[in-house]
Image: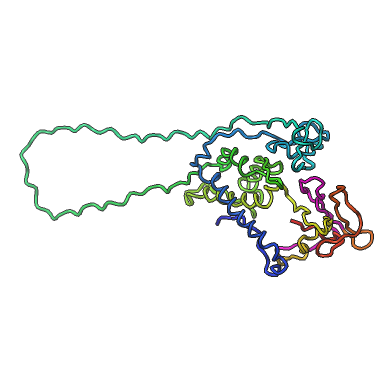
Amino acid sequence: MIKMAQPRPIQHQQLRRQRPRLAKRRRATSSFYASFLYACIFLVDSQTHLANAVYEDICFTPCQATTDSYNEVVPGTGCEIYHMCAEGEVKNRVACGSPLLYDPINGYCNYATAVICPEDPTCPPFPPPTLPPTPQPTNPPTPIPTSSPTSQPTQPPTNSPTPAPTTEEPTFPPTRSPITPVNPLDHYRSKRSLIEKHILVAKTASGITYPSTRYTFEGLLNGLQIMAIDKALPLYVFYLGEEDDKYPNSFAYGAVNLAAFLANAMVLAIQSDACDEHNWQEVAGRYAISNSCGQEGRSYQDEECGEVFSCPVDPDMEMTAVTAGSQIRAPPPFTCEPGTGAGNYAGYWDTSSGTEIEIPYSNSLGRTDTEGCCWWG
């Protein structure tokens, strides 16, 4: 059984109120299958000419210059995106927006004609793996025939004919998958350049691509090592194949499983370089802080999947998301905290000033608080 990553299904009781989202879901599903086929090319087909290419990729670890607060250009974006760094971590990712570029000399977004954009750092070429030569079969030597003296023929006795021996069909070992390493991670290490160049890639709102800073190749391998090789959680094992003659194509099945997982991640998270849902719905030109309770008229905490798959809502839970939008003065990460009524009203985010206005302001479903609203995507 191949464990396939699938887009989250729509519950039947939600169809009526989710009708505006159906077109968006259809586009997401189409993107999933396109990404799935794309990932399969790089992970499954080890004979593709792309797998034998040598790439000179961007070599970049964000926010490593110093632990102090500073900004840095994101390589591969032509100075259109920059990181806000502090304590050696990315605190925010900001796009200047056309026609401006980030000016690393002056430290702010400036007109393109006034910006000197630095060259992207590069890594040395990553060569394809060297495969051992295929040994040529060795034929046994042909013996020289020995001549014997000629003698008079002897009439043999007449016997009943002896049946010819039955010749069995030759047996061959099962055909092995082209992906048959003892540790499948060795196969994926050989495809690092392809994975980083074509899969672990994020996009800005204007479609500019850049290497994902949140989803890295080392992070992917570390996760697969824990979940697939070490099997740290026996009930939740990520299938990458087994070294077993009973299933000769198991590593190819595992590669397809990984391709499906990465395709889903590309659509839902990698392309936006985010691990949380963002506050993106405007209500009368403002972003309600209570959008964490649900956007497009949804109430996330009321959407259940039965007792087995749903956790009870805890009104005392407090949480803050990790990621937010990358545009200038984007709304902050979602939050939830206990409390309703006077003194606990949630306001709205004003993009013109980049500040939260603390007056009662409702989302599209009428919520003016964030109690129990810790269920964003």
Q: Position of residue 310 (x, y in %)?
A: 73, 63
As drawn, the residue found furthest toward the right would be: 343
Side (left or right) of 345 relative to 77: right
Magenta segment, prevailing SS (helix, strand or loop): loop
Quarter placement of the C terminus:
bottom right
Residue at x-position 69% and y-position 50%: 269
Which sits in the foreground, 34 or 153? 34
Residue at x-position 75% and y-position 41%: 99
Side (left or right) of 9 relative to 336: left
Reply above or below: 249 against 23. above
Residue at x-position 40% and y-position 34%: 135
Quarter placement of the N terminus:
bottom right
Which span is picked out in magenta? 309-337
Q: Is residue 242 visible?
A: yes
User: How many marks are shown on the rendered structure?
Assistant: 0
Q: Is residue 18 magenta?
A: no
Q: Position of residue 122 (x, y in %)?
A: 65, 31
Q: Position of residue 226 (x, y in %)?
A: 65, 46
Which sits in the foreground, 148 or 234? 234
> Colour scheme in the image?
rainbow
Residue at x-position 61% and y-position 48%: 228
Reply above or below: 7 against 193. below
Q: Is residue 323 magenta?
A: yes
Q: Position of residue 171 (x, y in %)?
A: 36, 49
Reply above or below: 260 against 112. below
Which sits in the foreground, 115 or 181? 115
Q: Is residue 93 visible?
A: no
As drawn, the residue found furthest toward the front would be: 113
